[in-house]
Image (tube, rainbow, N blue to C red):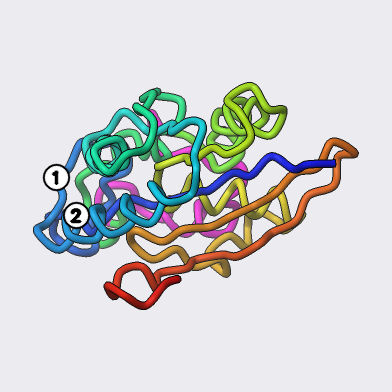
Amino acid sequence: MKPVTVYLLRHGQVDFPPGIYYGQMDVPLSEEGKRQSLLAARRMAMSGLDAVLCSDLERCTFMASLIQQEGGPGPESMSALREVNFGRWAGLSWDEIDKQYPGEMTKRMNDLEHYRPPGGESLSDLLLRVKKVFSRCISGDYGGKVAIVAHGGVNRVLLADFLEISLQKIFCLHQDHACINCVEYYPDGNGVLKFMNVTCHLEEGVCP
């Protein structure tokens, strides 16, 4: 009854104006985000990983490549692990969206599960996309210990699905930059959330 362990990581802090919806835009990491990525990578390299999967956006591939440099396995990047697609809203602030698409942001917030921004995805679409990868992980296709380096939205929908929480409530599941979550799945189909939104590794010497 040995479980499959899957670590869900969020990328580090980005160098981008706050309050802007960037979604699948390939925005760079800040210097602090690079520091966070290195510390998260060092923590994960000690975990005996069999595989590292990551979003193919730079803010995620950077951390995944550092895991390899610190002694972990080489990463496999995939577009399926990208953040939710905001479509034509990408690069806009809440106020700009409200001006260009009056009332549409309210509609989205009232139905996060199903509402699609123009040219974008709903949270149900995001879950369907990322769960295909996650299901392969928990089935053991990538080995007994797997790290997924992705995004806040990706982590939230996967954790909400695991905990049977409505996607309308995903913002109750906070995800700090460079945080680590851990779930274990057993052959009988049962799963355990070992920990969520852990960031002690960002203070050097704090985590065992």
27 with respect to 175 (left or right): left
* Residue 194, image x, y percentages: 66, 62
Boundaries of the magenta span: 99-120
The local secondary structure at tag 1 comes to loop
Q: Residues within 10 Å of mark 2 (few under 14, many from 20)?
A: some
Residue at left offset 69%, top offset 39% = 4
Screen quadrant of the C terminus: bottom left
Label for residue 28?
1
- Inspect the magenta stretch and tell me whether residue 196 lies in it: no
Screen quadrant of the N terminus: top right
* Residue 38, image x, y percentages: 23, 53
Residue at left offset 69%, top offset 59% = 193
Q: Residues within 10 Å of mark 1 (few under 14, many from 20)?
A: some
| Quadrant in the rendering for residue 84 | top left
Rendered view: 202 above or below 190: below
Residue at left offset 43%, top offset 33% = 52
Q: Are circles 1 and 2 on residues that touch, CB within 8 Å?
A: yes
Nearer to me, 16 or 81 = 81
Rendered view: 76 above or below 22: above
The local secondary structure at tag 2 comes to loop
Could you tell me how far apart the alpha carbons at marks 1 and 2 are, in whole angstroms? 6 Å
Residue at left offset 57%, top offset 69% = 172
| Quadrant in the rendering for residue 200 | bottom left
- Inspect the magenta stretch and tell me whether residue 118 lies in it: yes
Residue occupied by mark 2: 14
Q: Earlier in the sequence, mark 1 or mark 2?
A: 2
Nearer to me, 105 or 25 = 25
* Residue 46, image x, y percentages: 42, 51
168 with respect to 185 (left or right): left
Q: Amino acid at mark 1?
A: Pro
Q: Amino acid at mark 2?
A: Val
